């Protein structure tokens, strides 16, 4: 049996240095979080069109076009999370979704929900990557 050495604590006075998250590849984990969030957003936006039309009333052509365009943009950004600008572009996407609330109130609700989810993803990113 080989003797296993204890792991070094995250950050303490005895062991100064960068705080370790415990993840093998923190960058990859954070990219996965961002990509998963954007992919889920794209799916929800596309699936929400019909229920909004049935329950919410007059969802016009402009609103449907905006939803489809935002869903496509979210799906494309999910695939581009390796790019350094992708997180900022995701934030802009959340702002555009909030603005689409001017076309229909239910889009504002979705915008608020996904803006909060995106803000949490930014928080997790900041905690993991420092």
Image (cartoon, rainbow, N blue to C red):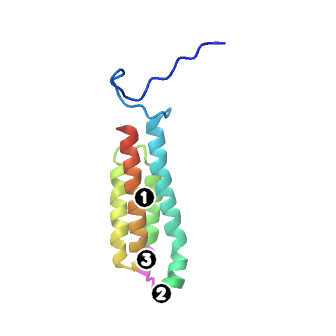
| Total labels drawn | 3
Q: In which quarter of the image is residue 26?
A: top left
Picture layout, residue 56 above or below residue 128: below
**Disc number for residue 117:** 1
Tell me the chief SS of the magenta region. helix
Q: Residue pushed farthest right?
A: 1
Q: What element carries label 1?
A: helix
User: Looking at the image, do the residues carrying marks 3 and 1 touch, with CB atoms under 8 Å apart?
Assistant: no
Q: What element carries label 2?
A: loop
Residue at the disc numbered 3? 106
Sequence-first tag of 1 and 2: 2
Mark 3 surroundings: few (<14), some (14-19) or many (≥20) residues within 10 A: some
- Across and down, in percent, residue 66 comes to 41, 72
CA–CA distance between discs 3 and 1? 17 Å
CA–CA distance between discs 2 and 3? 10 Å
Picture layout, residue 24 above or below residue 14: below
**Disc number for residue 57:** 2
User: Is 60 colored magenta in this rendering?
Assistant: yes
Mark 2 surroundings: few (<14), some (14-19) or many (≥20) residues within 10 A: few
Q: Which residue is drawn at 45% across and 76% down?
A: 64
């Amino acid at each position: 049996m080989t003797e296993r050495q204890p792991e070094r604590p995250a950050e303490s006075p005895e062991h100064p240095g960068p705080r370790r998250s415990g993840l093998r590849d923190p960058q990859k984990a954070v990219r996965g979080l961002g990509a998963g969030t954007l992919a889920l957003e794209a799916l929800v936006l596309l699936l929400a069109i019909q229920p909004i039309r049935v329950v919410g009333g007059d969802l016009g052509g402009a609103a449907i076009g905006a939803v489809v365009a935002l869903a496509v943009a979210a799906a494309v950004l999910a695939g581009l999370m390796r790019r350094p600008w992708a997180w900022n572009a995701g934030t802009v996407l959340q702002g555009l979704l909030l603005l689409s609330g001017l076309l229909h109130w239910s889009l504002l609700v979705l915008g608020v929900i996904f803006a909060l989810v995106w803000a949490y993803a930014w928080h997790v990113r900041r905690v993991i990557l420092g």
